[in-house]
Image (cartoon, coloured by chain):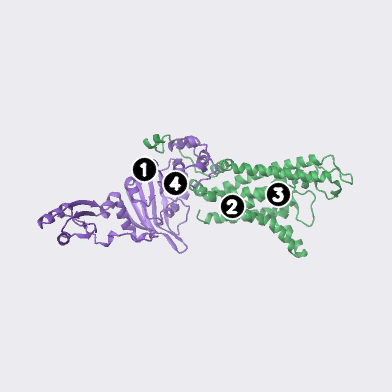
Chain colours: A green, B purple
């Protein structure tokens, strides 16, 4: 490096192309894509997501195939094969929080905001890129889980003689499988919003798990007549209706339920956005 | 060109920056000097829009930095070299920054070469030494070939070679007509690099002048004399308008007279001198003196403060 010392460098050995327009959302999105694909944790998390979702779905499908006696008329083969989603919510929640909190824990946020001080642009780019990544991953694991699960159950029949497995053409099935991907993306966005609000990885993940898991459990301690009115509005319970094919009338409908989950995510995002605009970085 | 007008930042009950007004002109290195905790970093953060001023405004090239069309072409800043995601390679770190401002990817290779980091471009920054981290921060600052560059304590923790490299770089960048704003808590560092100084203490402006002016105004000519006849000499010199301090080691420190005048007076009164040496209070001392009342945290042991004596700028005879 002594050569560098000897000849002090200057900034402009090669002229940059003349600036045009304004640095905006398109560049910010390219930047966020580079960020998300250039850290190993992204790949590990996504790999864990695929393994957990598909693996768990395969396991519960295998269980159903081996115990046809347990499968009554209400058996939902689609929902069963997507059962891994219950656990993969946790993983997408980690990735959603890390997308923003890792910038705070490393201090990278200050560098990012020095490159693009328009906070709205940075926020929007991050949200768009993470939403796209989590939706794409969610759809892949949802379809993969479905096909693997159905393959395991195919050829098996319930005691009443119905085949256990279903195909994408059966009523509500395609909506439910796509819904699995939507559900994961919405959980991820909820965690992203919480990450923006709390700026702290552990805090954001804890809050997201509290909302998605603990809250649903806590409702069980309420008097039954209250529970009936409250638990269908819980984010995880409302959101899971989108990947069920046989609607339970005591819960919200698939799209209404999903809209409720999106409402929670939107509230977290808006709160995060307002705080991001106001606070010192 | 950076312009601050009445810039103020309050954190709870602490006033970090207090009614600060200054301008940083292009084509020279402006040193931003102040003891630790004086508000230098906070001021730089407000210039970048990271912190919102409680009152006042600061502009870069006439408008708030957050309204710049191409922020990285306007300002390159090195505030905290550790503000990177350690899991990302140097190349990808710079690439994701370049993309935000639609800068061509080849520019990343250029700044890596410029800062001597080409060989470690693909390495994750987690393993970088302090010096390499500093170079990476400078590479990021140079990406947009900006007209304004800000460095916050850039030589902290660097080896002599790294310090020399940064000094030369800053001078070269200023010579190209850029605005260079560099903070330090060490006067000695500024003495070697800066053309102009903005000195703050406790968030307030203390001095805004050229380095030459600062030296002239703040460093006093002193003369060290050693004599077997301390009593008579002290009286003679005091009568001649100087202030004299007994250093305790058999020498006297004389302020307010030139060495020649001290020698002449001794000769006229037949006082023997064993030593007569001019001494100049260092800029470091002058800076300490100037900011003595503005240091946020004093060390437990009181430091001898030469400012207790009357300061008479000696015109000689």
Label 3: state its secondary structure: helix
On the rendered structure, is B98 left or right of A177? left
- Callout 2 environment at 10 Å: few (<14), some (14 to 19), or many (20+)? many
Query: Which of the pair B267/B81 is nearer the observer?
Result: B267
- Mark closer to the chain start, 1 or 4: 4
Q: Are marks 1 and 4 on the same chain?
A: yes
Between B95 and B279, the one nearer to me in the picture: B279
The part of the image, by quadrant, that contains residue A181 is top right
Q: In front: A16, or B131?
A: B131
Work out how far the residue at label 2 is from the one at label 3, CA to CA, in angstroms.
Answer: 19 Å
Q: Are marks 2 and 1 on the same chain?
A: no
Give the x, y percent position of residue B179: 38, 45
Q: Earlier in the sequence, mark 2 or mark 3?
A: 3
Query: Residue A131 at what x, y percent from top left?
Result: 63, 46
- Alpha carbons under labels 1 and 3: distance apart: 55 Å
Seen in the image, is B116 located left or right of residue A44?
left
At x 55%, y 56%, the residue is A275
Q: Secondary structure at mark 4?
A: strand
* In this rendering, position of residue A14 left or right of residue B85: left
Same chain letter for marks 1 and 3 = no
Subunit that carries the residue with mark 3: A
Check disc 1 and report the residue beneath it: B167
Residue linked to disc 2: A201
Mark 3 lies on residue: A87
């Amino acid at each position: 490096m002594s050569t560098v010392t000897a000849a002090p460098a200057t900034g402009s050995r090669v002229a940059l192309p003349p600036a045009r327009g304004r640095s905006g959302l398109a560049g910010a999105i390219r930047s966020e894509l580079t960020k998300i694909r250039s850290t190993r944790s992204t790949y590990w998390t996504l790999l864990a997501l695929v393994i957990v979702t598909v693996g768990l779905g395969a396991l519960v499908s295998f269980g159903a195939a081996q115990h046809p006696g347990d499968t009554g008329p209400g058996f939902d083969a689609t929902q069963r094969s997507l059962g891994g989603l219950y656990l993969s919510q946790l993983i997408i929640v980690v990735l959603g929080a890390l997308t923003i909190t890792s910038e705070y824990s490393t201090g990278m946020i200050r560098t990012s905001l020095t490159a693009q001080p328009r906070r709205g642009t940075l926020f929007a780019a991050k949200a768009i890129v993470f939403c796209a990544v989590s939706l794409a991953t969610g759809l892949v694991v949802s379809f993969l889980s479905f096909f693997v699960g159905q393959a395991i159950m195919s050829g098996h029949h319930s005691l009443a003689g119905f085949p256990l497995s279903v195909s994408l053409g059966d009523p509500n099935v395609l909506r439910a499988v796509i819904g699995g991907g939507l559900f994961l993306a919405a959980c991820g966005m909820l965690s992203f919003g919480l990450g923006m609000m709390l700026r702290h990885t552990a805090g954001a993940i804890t809050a997201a798990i509290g909302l998605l898991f603990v809250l649903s459990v806590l409702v069980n301690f309420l008097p039954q007549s209250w529970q009936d009115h409250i638990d269908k509005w819980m984010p995880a319970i409302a959101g899971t209706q989108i990947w069920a094919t046989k609607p339970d009338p005591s819960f919200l409908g698939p799209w209404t339920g999903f809209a409720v989950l999106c409402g929670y995510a939107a509230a977290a995002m808006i709160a995060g956005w307002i705080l991001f605009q106001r606070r010192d970085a | 060109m950076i312009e601050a007008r009445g810039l103020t930042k309050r954190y709870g009950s602490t006033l970090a920056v207090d009614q600060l007004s200054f301008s940083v002109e292009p084509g020279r290195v402006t040193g931003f000097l102040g003891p630790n905790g004086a508000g230098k970093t906070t001021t730089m953060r407000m210039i970048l829009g990271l912190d919102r001023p409680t009152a006042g405004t600061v502009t870069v090239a006439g408008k708030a930095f957050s309204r710049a069309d191409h922020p990285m072409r306007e300002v390159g800043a090195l505030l905290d070299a550790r503000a990177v995601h350690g899991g990302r390679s140097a190349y990808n770190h710079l690439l994701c920054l370049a993309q935000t401002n639609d800068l061509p990817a080849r520019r990343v290779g250029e700044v890596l070469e410029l800062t001597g980091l080409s060989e470690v471009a693909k390495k994750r920054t987690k393993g970088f030494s302090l010096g390499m981290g500093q170079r990476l921060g400078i590479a990021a600052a140079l990406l947009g070939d900006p007209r304004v560059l800000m460095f916050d304590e850039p030589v902290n923790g660097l080896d002599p070679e790294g310090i020399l490299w940064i000094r030369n770089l800053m001078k070269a960048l200023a010579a190209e007509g850029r605005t260079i704003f560099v903070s330090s808590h060490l006067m000695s560092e500024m003495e070697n690099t800066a053309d102009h100084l903005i000195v703050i203490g406790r968030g307030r402006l203390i001095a805004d002048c050229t380095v030459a002016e600062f030296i002239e105004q703040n460093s006093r000519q002193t003369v060290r004399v050693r004599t077997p006849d301390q009593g008579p000499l002290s009286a003679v010199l005091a009568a001649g308008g100087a202030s004299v301090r007994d250093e305790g080691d058999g020498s006297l420190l004389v302020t307010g007279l030139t060495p020649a005048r001290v020698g002449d007076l001794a000769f006229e009164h037949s006082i023997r001198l064993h030593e007569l040496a001019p001494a100049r209070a260092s800029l470091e001392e002058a800076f300490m003196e100037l900011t003595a009342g503005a240091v946020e945290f004093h060390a437990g042991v009181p430091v001898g403060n030469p400012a207790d004596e009357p300061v008479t700028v000696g015109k000689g005879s």
